[in-house]
């Protein structure tokens, strides 16, 4: 595993997402075309906390899955950023999604994604998110990359 210097500035160059939908803050580890570990700092300032159980704020599970999908997209785009310029990584499927523990303000969500296979333009990833070493969520994610008009 390498410890690349992929901070928020590099992430913004690789992903089209912006606040409030950009859900990855930093890449901690990356083995190209194999595995990635990223970080999302969860703060009380997140816009969804005002309406998602305001008296007991919990990060919506669908956003944890989106953070995992963005992490997988970073792995997809990392070495191919020039070839995939003007392309988007579309989230096309989820299998076996499970939520094991709530995620709330102050948590650091550690996002793991590993390539399971690549075939005919479709990527399949095994992904999980942890907080303090405990699994918060896990799923298999499917994505495809498509060129878009500039």
Image: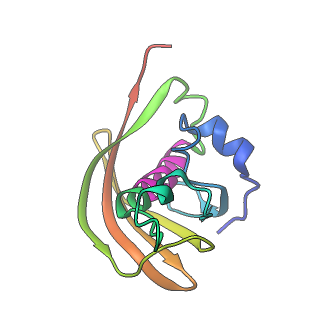
Which image quadrant is residue 29 in? Answer: bottom right
- Position of residue 55 relative to residue 12, above or below, is below
Q: Is residue 41 magenta?
A: no
Colour scheme in the image? rainbow
Q: Residue furthest top?
A: 150
Q: Position of residue 43 (x, y in %)?
A: 62, 63
Q: Main secondary structure of the magenta part?
A: helix
What residue appears at the point 65 percent right and 45 percent down from the top-left corner?
11
What residue appears at the point 65 percent right and 39 percent down from the top-left corner?
12
Query: Is 119 on the left or on the right of 12, as rendered?
Result: left
Q: Residue furthest front?
A: 55
Q: Which one is nearer the viewer's eye here, 117 or 95?
A: 95
What residue appears at the point 56 percent right and 39 percent down from the top-left corner?
15
- Position of residue 93 relative to residue 90, above or below, is below
Q: Position of residue 6 (x, y in %)?
A: 71, 52
Q: Position of residue 134 (x, y in %)?
A: 48, 86
Tell me the magenta residue range: 66-77
- Position of residue 58 relative to residue 52, above or below, is below
What residue appears at the point 47 percent right and 54 percent down from the top-left corner?
48
Q: Position of residue 21 (x, y in %)?
A: 51, 44
Q: Quadrant of the N terminus?
A: bottom right
Give the mark count.
0
Query: Is 1 on the left or on the right of 51, as rendered?
Result: right
């Amino acid at each position: 595993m390498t410890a690349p210097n992929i901070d928020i500035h590099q992430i913004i160059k690789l992903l089209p997402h912006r606040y409030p939908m950009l859900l990855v803050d930093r890449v901690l580890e990356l083995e190209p075309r194999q595995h990635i570990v990223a970080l999302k700092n969860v703060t009380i300032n997140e816009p969804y906390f005002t309406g998602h159980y305001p008296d007991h704020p919990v990060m919506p599970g669908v956003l944890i899955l989106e953070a995992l999908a963005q992490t997988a997209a970073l792995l997809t785009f990392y070495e191919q950023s020039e070839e995939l310029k003007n392309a988007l990584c579309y989230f096309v499927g989820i299998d076996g999604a499970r939520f094991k523990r709530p995620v709330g303000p102050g948590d650091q969500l550690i996002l793991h994604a590993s390539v399971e296979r690549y075939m005919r333009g479709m990527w399949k990833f095994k992904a999980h998110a942890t907080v303090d070493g405990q699994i918060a969520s896990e799923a298999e994610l499917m994505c495809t990359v498509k060129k878009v008009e500039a």
